[in-house]
Image (spheres, rainbow, N blue to C red):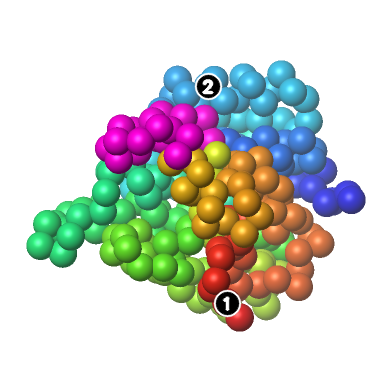
């Protein structure tokens, strides 16, 4: 299927690794020109070098801190200057839900812990949308995809649930405002996803639990209805579709991309 992305101009945040990198790769492979944004210059340059060697659309690195509005506006300015505009924004710049280890209990939860997450994942996504949306509205077409997470649909991690629910709520509000102007806004909820960081993460989880790494993977897979963990590339395939003109029928909605959660019914 031709996703009709050739020549489209995309900005992907959090693009130096993980799901963000996989999305940038998928879009470039479809012929889109992609600005890769992340905070670390070295990792970002390496990501761009990898994509440039694979062919496809043009790729450009822009060091960006999405907690800084001036940095975000400079990112969009770079994209407009290099490619002539922005058609697609994928927000994926966020701290992994498990990066800080086990979620704190209520008594141990500090205000700043939640503030940091909201500053990065919620306000960071909002800053990027606010900077890019006027360009999309002016041309009458655009796509914004926010990468959130399945913590939006389950308890057990208060900070993770709050930030991801907030992203979903923001998505719907933006979709209702921008949809009449040809700009669709959607959100995807990955679950535990296989990325380059997974081996180290699983090893740490195994050490903490006092079991073999294979047992950790087995436990994680047992909760997924397809019987295995989804890869970053598979998440990116769904995101690429949502970035395409073919996704026009989807706006404001959340798409789960975790391989299916056993038991729960979402409608």
Q: Is residue 124 above or below residue 28?
A: below
Left or right: residue 64 versus residue 259 is: left
Return the x and y of residue 93 as percentages of the image width and height.
Answer: 45, 45
With respect to residue 154, does 94 lie above or below? above
* Label 1 Cα neighbours within 10 Å, binned few <14 / some 14-19 / many ≥20: few
**Circle 2 is placed at which residue position?**
45
Q: Is residue 92 visible in the rendered structure shown here?
A: no
Q: Is residue 231 depicted above or below 223 in this figure?
A: above
Task: Kindly give the residue lying farthest to the left in the view shown.
Answer: 107
Residue 238: give x, y in percent of width and height.
69, 54
Q: Nearer the viewer, residue 208 or 211?
A: 211
| Magenta stretch bounds | 195-215
| Tag of residue 92 | none
Residue occupying the point 39% across, 54% down: 121
Examine the image and state in which quarter residue 158 appears. bottom left
The residue identified by callout 1 is 265
Residue drawn at 79 percent across, 48 percent down? 5
* The magenta stretch spans residue 210: yes
* Numbered disc 2: secondary structure: helix
Pick whichever, 57 or 159, lies toward us: 159
Tell me if residue 5 is in the magenta stretch.
Answer: no
Could you tell me residue 69's position as x and y percent?
Answer: 37, 50
Question: Please, what secondary structure does the residue beneath circle 1 have?
Answer: loop
């Amino acid at each position: 299927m031709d996703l009709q992305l050739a020549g489209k101009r995309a900005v992907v945040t959090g693009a130096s690794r993980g799901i963000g990198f996989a999305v940038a790769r998928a879009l470039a492979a479809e012929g889109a020109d992609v600005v890769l944004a992340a905070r670390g210059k070295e990792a970002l340059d390496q990501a761009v070098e990898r994509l440039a060697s694979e062919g496809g659309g043009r790729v450009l690195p822009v060091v960006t801190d999405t907690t800084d509005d001036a940095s975000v506006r400079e990112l969009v300015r770079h994209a407009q200057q290099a490619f002539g505009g922005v058609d697609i924004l994928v927000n994926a710049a966020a701290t992994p839900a498990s990066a800080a280890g086990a979620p704190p209990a209520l008594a141990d939860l500090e205000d700043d812990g939640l503030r940091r997450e909201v500053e990065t994942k919620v306000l960071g996504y909002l800053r990027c949308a606010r900077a890019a949306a006027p360009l999309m509205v002016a041309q009458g077409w655009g796509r914004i995809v926010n990468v959130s997470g399945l913590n939006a649909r389950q308890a057990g991690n208060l900070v993770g649930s709050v930030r991801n629910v907030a992203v979903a709520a923001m998505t719907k509000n933006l979709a209702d405002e921008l949809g009449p102007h040809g700009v669709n806004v959607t959100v995807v909820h990955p679950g535990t996803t296989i990325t380059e960081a997974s081996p180290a993460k699983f090893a740490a989880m195994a050490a903490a639990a006092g079991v073999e790494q294979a047992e950790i993977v087995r436990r994680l897979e047992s909760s997924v209805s397809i019987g295995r963990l989804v890869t970053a590339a598979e998440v990116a395939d769904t995101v690429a579709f949502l970035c395409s003109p073919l996704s026009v029928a989807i706006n404001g909605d959340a798409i789960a991309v975790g391989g299916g959660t056993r038991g729960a019914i979402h409608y």
